Amino acid sequence: MSARSMRGERGARSRRVTMRRTISARRFSSRTGASSDPWLLTINAPPAVEIAAFAGLIQMIASALLVPRRSLCYNGHSKRFEEADVTIGTMHIILIRHGQTAWNAGAGEERFRGRTDLPLDETGQAQARALAARLQDEPIRAIYSSPLARAQQTVAPLAVALGLPVVAHDGLLDINYGDWQGLTHAEARSADPNLYHLWRTAPGRVRFPGGEGLNDVQTRLLALLDELAARYPAETVALVGHQIVNKVLICTLLGLDLDQIWRIGQDTAAINRFQLGDDGWHVLSLNHCPTT
C-alpha cells in the first residue's frame, strides 16, 4: 500500500471513530439543549478509595470528557429529560450499596446473589447503623431502595433518622442471574467455562441463561433516572442498590462502556455521590465506606 493510501485509510478510520463518538454522545441530554463543550467532571477521591483502582478509573473518565455538556452516554442511543422547567445545577444522587450478607462475607464463600432475598449479617447491621450516622444530617428529600431485604435493612436506620419513607423500586433490584443464582464462582466456572470467562472479561456481552444482561439492568435504571429528574430536579435523593446495579449506574452517569464495571470498586455499604450541574454530572466521591 502506498504512503498516500495508508494516510487515506488512517483518515477514514479517524472519521469513523469520530462519528461513533459523536453518535454515542447523545444520551440523556437536557431539553434545554446540548452544547459542544465537554463535561466538567470534578472528582474528590475519598480516603477509602484505593489509589491504584482510582487511577484506573481516572483513565476511564478521561475518555468520557468527549461527551457534550448535559449528556450521558448510553450505547449510542439518545434520551432526553422531558421536564422543560427542570432546574439544572443542584440535583444530588447519593448512591449506596447494601451491607454485608452471608453470601458476600469474607469468611464465607461468595455466591451469585441476584434475586435471592438475603438478610444482613451482624457486620451488615453494624454497617447500616454507621451509614445512618454518616448521612443523617444530609438534606435528603427521598429514599429509593431495591425491594430486597438486604437493601431495605441497610437503609432502615437512615430512614428512621430522617423521618422518611423508603420507596421500594424494581429499577434497583439486583441483576437476575437466572440459572447461576446461588452458585459459587467455582460452580459457575465449572458449569460454563466460556460464559464465566466472558463475564469476567466482557460482561456487557453476557446474558445469563434464564436471567438478565447488563443492558437490561441499565434500561431499568434509566427509567428510574427519568422518574427522579421529573420529581426531584433540584434536590438530594438517596438510592440503595447492589454491587452490579451500582456499577452499571456509575458507568451510565459517566458515559462508560458496561464492560468497564470491574474497574469500579463497590464495597458493601459504600457511599457514592454525584451532582448534576449545567455542564453534566460531577463525581463527588466513589466507594466511600463509613467506619463501623
Image: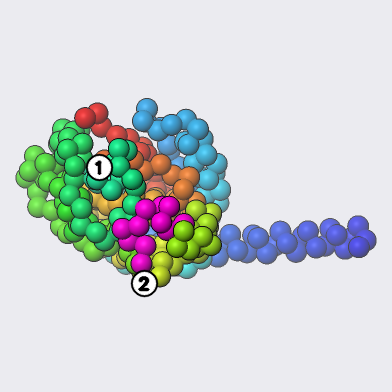
Q: Position of residue 253 (x, y in %)?
A: 40, 52
Which of the 4 image quarters holds residue 107?
top left
Give, as a single range, the part of the protein colored magenta: 179-189
By secondary structure, the bulk of the magenta-drawn segment is best described as helix
Quadrant position of residue 161 = top left
Whether the magenta-drawn stretch holds residue 221 is answered as no
The image shows residue 112, relative to residue 42, as above or below, that is below
Q: Residue furthest right?
A: 2
Q: Please, what secondary structure does the residue beneath circle 1 have?
A: loop
Of the 4 image quadrants, the one containing the N terminus is bottom right
For residue 186: magenta?
yes
Question: How is the model colour-coded?
Answer: rainbow
Q: CA distance from mark 1 to mark 2?
A: 26 Å
Q: Is residue 240 above or below residue 284?
A: below
Q: Which residue is label 1 attached to?
A: 100
Q: Nearer the viewer, residue 110 or 240?
A: 110
Q: Is residue 120 visible?
A: yes
What percent of the width, then of the height, locates residue 280?
41, 50
Considering only order in the chain, which callout, 2 or 1, is on the residue closer to the N terminus? 1
Q: Quadrant of the image for the C terminus?
A: top left
Q: Is residue 228 left or right of residue 126?
A: right
Residue 63 pos. (x, y %): 56, 48
Kind of residue sitting beneath label 2:
Gly
Q: For this view, does 205 lie left or right of residue 160? A: right
Q: Which mark is residue 210?
A: 2
- Say how many tags the image has: 2
| Between 221 and 93, the one nearer to me in the picture | 221
Determine crowd level at label 2: few under 14, some 14-19, many 20+ residues with C-alpha closer than 10 A.
few
Residue at figure coordinates x 17%, y 35% from the top left: 126
**Amino acid type for the residue under numbered disc 1:** Gln
